[in-house]
């Protein structure tokens, strides 16, 4: 393609790329679920309008695994929403939801909730524990019930969204249709009123000072970019971490068309560690994916990664801190192995 020399390899407004970068590790590359609940679910997309998607991406689900993506621009969030909307079967866009206000009796809703919902969503709407889905195939997969008393969920969900979810259920997940289970539409309105009145559980205090730990761990490589990438991948394998992907950014091309690498990102994950850590504290999802960044400046290649110790300060959980220490050692070993 003459005349279209690429200076920035990834278009910032490309929803597919943004999704692959920020979401696929948890929600699956085609939205079929993973650590996160499935998003490419017709019943979900029929209930969730664009505003719900936008707010969920922005606010996340504080205290749960779903991070808040505050760093993305409005255009990027818009591109993500369009990309996710593209999975909806024709005619199933959230826009079709009736917006009329729903009048329910929260007192009656509470009784129904105790009877029909607590087993999965918890007595106070605190949700199931663990992660969204197993890593196995869909169908009989145990999708985790989301927290309904979550400030992120309550701020994102309209009454209509909750109502549609209760009426339709979400086929291929454990969430049933309560119309099919025999509840009347008025019962469903009562449940909506009750869920709407959930008080968000109080969130832990803001992070203590993290000033002591550097935000990143970095090592300078004696090798060129290709060799360093190769050694890094070997070191990741040797540490029993699974390589998720490796992507080159900020490519430029010299006159003869040769690629001049500047910036490579390598994502990997230790799923054992991840599962252990998620059991201790689901917010550990903020670590994902374990990312190594290689950059070349003035012919010198350096490799860096976030410092898990610095992140662990956010969580204020001593059990988790021990795991973060362990992860810190693993990261340092990998960087030193790659640049030795
Ligand atoms: C660290 C894992 C993780 C990442 C990364 C992540 N999510 Fe999530 N997401 C989850 C989990 C887990 C839930 C379910 C929340 C709960 O259990 O309370 C969720 C919930 C959601 C929901 C609400 C689904 C529903 O049924 O209401 C949407 C929408 C969503 N995520 C979109 C995204 C998008 C878009 C991205 C990327 C920008 C993203 N997520 C990145 C883990 C993740
Ligand atoms: C058998 C377990 C189960 C029962 C019983 C159940 N749910 Fe769910 N519910 C789920 C699961 C799992 C999901 C997530 C489905 C998905 O992947 O999209 C869910 C999703 C939801 C959502 C959407 C949350 C979100 O983040 O988008 C709402 C609202 C909800 N349930 C309300 C209720 C209410 C109210 C009841 C009782 C009337 C109820 N559920 C009963 C398992 C259950």
Image: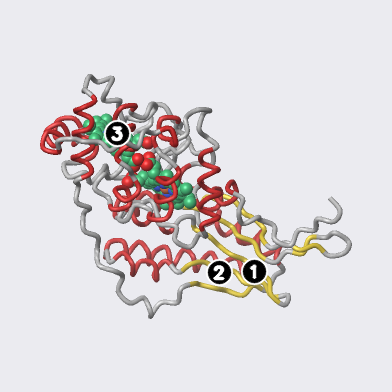
Q: Residue at x 27, y 22 (%)?
A: 179
Residue ID for mark 3 = 163
Q: Earlier in the sequence, mark 3 or mark 2?
A: 3
Q: Is residue 57 left or right of residue 243?
A: left
Does any atom of ligand 1 lie closer than 8 Å to the CB of label 2? no
Instruction: Report x, y in % for residue 183.
Output: 21, 23
Q: Earlier in the sequence, mark 2 or mark 1?
A: 1
Residue lying farthest to the front in this orientation: 100
Q: Which labelled disc corresponds to residue 304? A: 2
CA–CA distance between discs 3 and 1?
Answer: 49 Å
Mark 2, residues whose alpha carbon is within 10 Å: few (<14), some, or many (≥20)?
A: some
Residue ID for mark 1 = 295
Q: Is residue 16 left or right of residue 189?
A: right
Work out whether residue 297 or residue 187 is closer to the camera in this orientation and state it.
187
Instruction: Confirm or deny contact between disc 2 and disc 1 (CB under 8 A).
Output: yes
Instruction: Report x, y in % for residue 233.
Output: 61, 57
CA–CA distance between discs 3 and 2?
Answer: 47 Å
Instruction: Report x, y in % for residue 172.
Output: 39, 27
Q: Earlier in the sequence, mark 3 or mark 1?
A: 3
Name the front one of labels 3 and 2: 3
Q: Is residue 69 left or right of residue 221?
A: left
317 w.r.t. 213: above or below: above
Q: Is residue 83 left or right of residue 180?
A: right
Q: How is the image coloured?
A: secondary structure
4 w.r.t. 101: above or below: below
Name the front one of labels 3 and 1: 3
Q: Residue at x 33, y 67 (%)?
A: 314
Q: Quadrant of the C terminus?
A: bottom right
């Amino acid at each position: 393609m003459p005349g279209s020399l690429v200076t920035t390899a990834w278009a910032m407004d490309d929803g597919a790329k943004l999704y692959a970068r920020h979401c696929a590790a948890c929600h699956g590359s085609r939205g079929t679920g993973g650590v996160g609940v499935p998003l490419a679910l017709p019943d979900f997309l029929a209930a969730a309008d664009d505003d719900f998607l936008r707010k969920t991406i922005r606010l996340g689900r504080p205290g749960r695994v779903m991070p808040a993506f505050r760093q993305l621009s409005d255009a990027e969030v818009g591109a993500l929403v369009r990309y996710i909307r593209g999975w909806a079967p024709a005619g199933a866009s959230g826009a079709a939801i009736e917006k009329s206000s729903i009048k329910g009796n929260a007192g009656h809703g509470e009784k129904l909730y105790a009877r029909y919902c607590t087993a999965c969503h918890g007595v106070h709407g605190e949700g199931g524990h663990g992660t969204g889905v197993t890593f196995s195939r869909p169908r009989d997969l145990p999708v985790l019930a989301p927290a309904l008393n979550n400030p992120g969920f309550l701020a994102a969900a309209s009454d209509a969204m909750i109502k549609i979810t209760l009426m339709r259920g979400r086929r291929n997940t454990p969430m049933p249709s309560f119309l099919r289970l025999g509840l009347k539409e008025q019962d469903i309105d009562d449940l909506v009123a009750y869920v709407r009145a959930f008080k968000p559980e109080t969130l832990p205090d803001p992070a203590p000072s993290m000033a002591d730990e550097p935000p990143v761990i970095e090592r300078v490589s004696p090798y060129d970019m290709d060799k360093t990438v190769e050694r890094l991948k070997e070191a990741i394998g040797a540490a029993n971490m699974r390589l998720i992907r490796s992507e080159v950014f900020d490519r430029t091309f010299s006159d003869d068309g040769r690629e001049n690498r500047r910036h490579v990102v390598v994502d990997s994950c230790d799923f054992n560690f991840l599962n252990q850590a998620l059991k201790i504290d689901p917010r550990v999802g903020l670590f994902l994916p374990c990312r190594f960044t290689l950059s070349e400046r003035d012919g010198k290649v350096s490799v860096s990664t976030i410092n898990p110790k610095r992140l662990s300060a956010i969580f204020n959980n001593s059990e988790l801190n021990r795991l973060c220490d362990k992860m810190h050692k693993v990261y340092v070993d990998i960087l030193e192995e790659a640049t030795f």
